[in-house]
Amino acid sequence: MHPALWTGKTGLNAMDVKMSTIANNLANVNTVGFKRNRAIFEDLLYQAQKLPGAQNGGDTQLPTGLQLGTGVRVTATQRQFTEGSLEVTNQPLDMAINGRGFFRIQMPDGELAYTRNGQFHLDADGRIVNTNGFPVEPEIVVPENTNSISIGRDGTVTVTQAGQNNQPQQIGQIEVVDFVNPAGLLSIGHNLFVETAGSGAPLDGVGGENGFGAVEQSMLELSNVSAVEELVDMITTQRAYEMNTKVVSSADDMLRNLTQTL
């Protein structure tokens, strides 16, 4: 096989993965708390036919040598945890973290998950839950006959109840959790992440203190995907795909001419 055929094939595979990553970013341009992904590439092994510095007869040495690359591959996709813009919703249970951190969610199997999506609701038992019905951890239960809910920037949840002379009553606190390497978290869908060895252990904190982001009530963090940036990236990816297709086609023409000549 002509080496250029294999090299072009690796380029096509890499651009295909990158296009899939871009497509997922664009599909989630309106997903609350979504963080964009980007593909990371690396070149493959080199065939060193002449090593740099090798003797070239007499006292001379080769300054560069002769090394032929074998293509490219996608080594990882990195999630970028830059902050999205905040949108005011006027819904008392909508929350956004203005800065670093995640909300902690209790999964049905007991596992803990983490999210930047602060679209919360009340279930039939008065618990604060996400859109899938998973409660925040630690669990917070809003009493019956509650007139208003107030959430401080430190995550403190207070309510006022009918017949209590509008005296605020603290019922819990929304904890903010951070990681040394958020990009190492594992995405499991539903806007949720779980801890991995790459992310490190979760670090518990209080909103607005010690580098943790403050909790903003009645606001949501929008996706950090820029549609314009993704469309430009999509165009460059498409052109790179076409160029690799041209490499494969040109190598095929060279082999055809060689076959016809011989």
Image: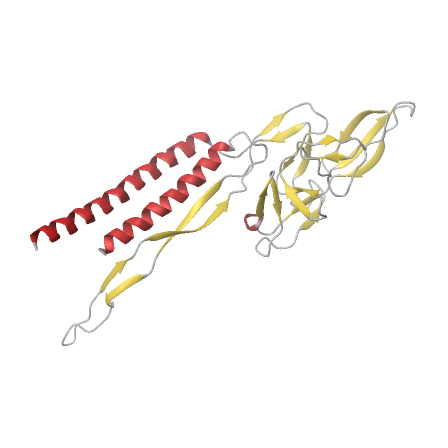
Residue 91 visible to an observer of this rendering: yes
62, above or below 80, in the image: below
In-image side of 217 versus 12 (left or right): right
Residue at image point 42% right, 33% down: 229
Residue 154: percent from left, percent from top: 73, 38
The total number of labels drawn is 0
Residue 227: percent from left, percent from top: 45, 30
**Where is residue 85, by image quadrant?**
top right
Q: Residue furthest left?
A: 261
Foreground residue, 111 or 109?
A: 109
Residue 146: percent from left, percent from top: 84, 26
**Where is residue 153, by image quadrant?**
top right
Residue 64 visible to an observer of this rendering: no
In-image side of 148 versus 226 (left or right): right
In-image side of 105 versus 45 (left or right): right
Residue 222: percent from left, percent from top: 57, 31
Foreground residue, 37 or 15?
A: 15
